[in-house]
Image (cartoon, rainbow, N blue to C red):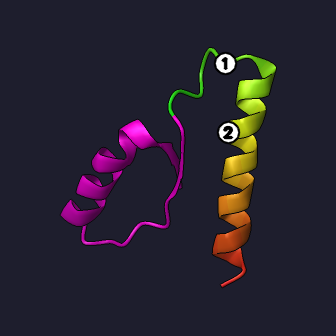
């Protein structure tokens, strides 16, 4: 799951309530309303996290 840092506590709380361990990639908040450069940074962070998660 990819979520912004603002929603990380919510994701973790919901996962705990459901007794699951989330695979979580966290990026800076917000994602909406960004210019191209800011969005590129979020995409690169998510790509890096996904690459690291799948390399394990």
Q: Secondary structure beneath disc 2?
A: helix
Whether residue 11 appears in magenta in the rendering, the answer is yes
The reply, left or right, for residue 15 in relation to residue 23 is: left
In the depicted structure, whether residue 24 falls above or below residue 44: below
Q: Secondary structure beneath disc 1?
A: loop
Q: CA distance from mark 1 to mark 2?
A: 10 Å
Q: Position of residue 11 (x, y in %)?
A: 34, 51
Q: Position of residue 8 (x, y in %)?
A: 37, 48
Image mark for residue 34: 1
- The residue at 43%/42% (across/down) is 5
- What is the total number of numbered labels drawn onto the structure image? 2
Whether residue 27 appears in magenta in the rendering, the answer is yes
Labels 1 and 2 touching (C-beta < 8 A): yes
Q: Earlier in the sequence, mark 1 or mark 2?
A: 1
- The residue at 32%/71% (across/down) is 20
**Mark 2 Cα within 10 Å, few/some/many (few <14, many 20+)?**
some
**Mark 1 Cα within 10 Å, few/some/many (few <14, many 20+)?**
few
- The residue at 54%/38% (across/down) is 28
Image mark for residue 42: 2
Q: Position of residue 56 (x, y in %)?
A: 65, 85
The magenta stretch is: 1-28
Q: Position of residue 19 (x, y in %)?
A: 25, 72
List the single residue furthest toward the bottom.
56
In the depicted structure, whether residue 13 falls above or below residue 10: below
List the single residue furthest toward the left.
17
- The residue at 29%/48% (across/down) is 9
In the depicted structure, whether residue 39 falls above or below residue 20: above
């Amino acid at each position: 799951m990819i979520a912004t840092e603002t929603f990380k506590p919510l994701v973790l709380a919901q996962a705990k309530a459901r007794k699951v361990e989330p695979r979580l990639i966290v990026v800076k908040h917000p994602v909406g309303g960004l210019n191209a450069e800011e969005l590129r940074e979020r995409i690169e962070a998510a790509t890096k996290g996904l690459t690291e998660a799948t390399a394990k």
